[in-house]
Structures are given as structure tokens and as C-alpha cells.
Image (cartoon, helix red, strand yellow):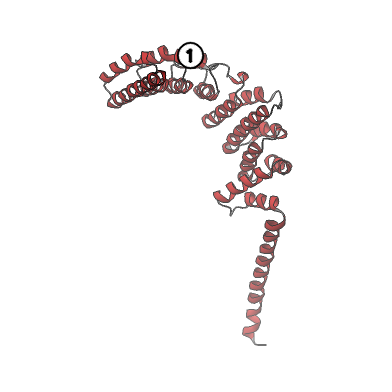
Amino acid sequence: MSIFTLALTPFVIGVWGILGILIIWTIYLLILWLFFPMQWHFHQLRSIWSGAKARNDAVEALAKIGTPAVPELLQALQHSHNSNLRKSAAETLGMIGDTRAIPALLQALQDSKDRRIRIHAAMALGKINHKAKALGKTSEPNAVPAFIQIVQNIGDADFSMATAFALGEIGDPIVVPEPLPGSKNVPHHLRNYATVTLEEIKGHRAIPALLQALKDSDAVIRREAAFALGKKGDHSVVPALLQALKDSDFAVRSDAIWALGKIGDTRAVQELLQAFQDEDPSIRHDAADAVLRIVDAWDLSQHQKS
């Protein structure tokens, strides 16, 4: 055997060793994919090589598997050091809707240093409670109060917004936040969280608090309130929205105009015509559009009556 061959032997052995490892790994993944689909999807969530699409596909697949996947998802949420896996686990648990996940999700709201995990845990709690109510089941009785207490202790605006939408999905009177928007000495992110929550709660029971929010000192809160009142479509809020047309903030005036056009009450036409004199051209455009929508709605109602 030549010196060259002796020198090359370790390299050849190394190459074959690497190839052998790759072959074994490929066979392992193939077995997972063919015979253990749930473990395959968890592998997709854990792998640093998985792209966003692969992880999203894995989340949807595990959600379809349903309750059999819950124990391992809970294990991942509570004990994994992989933040992508924990985020995906929270999202999947929300899609499955199993109430056994509520304690772990509440814990994730408090313990996680990753804001993405907090946001997905908040949304998951909303989905689980919503599904439980739709099926006539009861979730943990203390879940919603604990949920609200946690968000009040975390000064993260995005997390507060996610919580607002989640609580809106629950749609229970208990979720109307205290203190209500417009209360004095309440941090901005909590007033905003409360306003968006009220927007998402179905029905009309949130209207009094939204009318209060329309008077908030913060223009962002007033704008959210005007938009939410328009979505409610209740004609009783028209006088308050007409008053908002005189707001000093352009965005508030714009959303109030949109809301009046959405509600379609003819009482608003005269005030909207006056908005044609607004110094801002976009306000004048919005007012013209709102008047046209109100007139079209009125014409349609008259045609239906005849």
C-alpha cells in the first residue's frame, strides 16, 4: 500500500461515514413520515431547517390530529427551550380547542420572555374559551379573570392587542375590562386594549363603554372607539359620532365619518355636508363618500318598501 493511499484512507473513511449518517438520517425521517405522522410534524416544528410554510403546515396537520396531539403539545409548550416550537404549540392548542391546555397557556402568558409566545398563548386562550362556549361546555371558571389580571401586569402593547381580540372571541360580559376606557390614571396601552376588546365583543352591550372611550384624552383611543361604534351599526350612537366630527384630530374625524356612512342614518347627512368645508381634502372626500352611502341605503330601503 502506497504512502498516498495510507494518507487518503482517513479521508475516504470520513466521507463514507458522513454518507452513512446521512443515509441513516434520511431513512429515519422517511419512517417518521410514513408510519408516525404526528412525530413527523413535531420534527418539522423542532427543526431549525424548517421554513415558515413547513411549520405552518405542521401546525395545521397537528390541529387536524386533534386531542391525541395535546399531551405532547403541552409538553413542548411547558418544557421546550425551542421558542419556535413553543409558539407553534400554543397556536396549535388554540386551534384544537382542548380546555386541558388552559392552565399551561395561562402560565405561558406570565413566564415566557418571548413576546411571540405570549401573543399566541393569548389568542389560543380566546379560541379555546370560544369553542367551549359554542359546544355548551364550561372552561376553567377562573381562566378569564386570570387572563385579564395578567394583561394588566404586562406593559406590552402588541400583547394587549392580541389579548383584546382573544377576549372578544370569548364574548362574555365578564371580559369588559376594568377600568373602562377614559378612566383617569390608566396607562395608554390598557385603555387601548380595553377599547379594542369592546370592539370585538359581539352585540351591543359594549356600546356605553365605547361612547365613554370616544371622549378619551388620547386621539388613538377616540379613533378606535369611533371605528368600533360604526361596526356595531347601532343608530343610537349617531349623536355621539356627529359630535366627533368636530374633533381636533383628523383621524378621529375621518373614522367618525366612516362610521356614520356605515350606519347609514339620514340624520347624519346635514352634518356630513358641512364637513365638505373641512380644511383637509381627504376629510371632504370621506364625507362625500359617506353621504353617497347613506343616500344609497335610503333609496334601497324605499325601494324595498314599495
Give the quarter of the image for residue 149.
Answer: top right
Give the quarter of the image for residue 173.
Answer: top right
The residue shown at (62%, 23%) is 148
The residue shown at (66%, 38%) is 96
Q: Is residue 183 visible?
A: no
Q: Residue furthest bottom?
A: 1
Q: Is residue 151 visible?
A: yes
Q: Nearer the viewer, residue 252 or 7?
A: 252
- List the residue tagged with mark 1: 212
Q: Nearer the viewer, residue 227 or 50?
A: 227
Give the quarter of the image for residue 112.
Answer: top right
User: Could you tell me residue 7's position as x and y percent?
Assistant: 63, 80
Q: Nearer the viewer, residue 271 or 139?
A: 271
Q: Nearer the viewer, residue 303 or 35?
A: 303
Circle 1 crowding by C-alpha within 10 Å: few under 14, some 14–19, many from 20 = some
Q: Residue furthest front?
A: 306
Residue 306 versus residue 85 in the image, above or below: above
Quadrant location of the C terminus? top left
Total marks in image: 1
In the rendered view, does 123 fall on the left or right side of 136?
left
User: Could you tell me residue 61's position as x and y percent?
Assistant: 64, 47
In the rendered view, does 27 fall on the left or right side of 161?
right
In the rendered view, does 132 fall on the left or right side of 119?
right
User: Could you tell me residue 76's position as x and y percent?
Assistant: 69, 43
User: Could you tell me the amino acid type at mark 1?
Assistant: Gln
SS at badge 1: helix
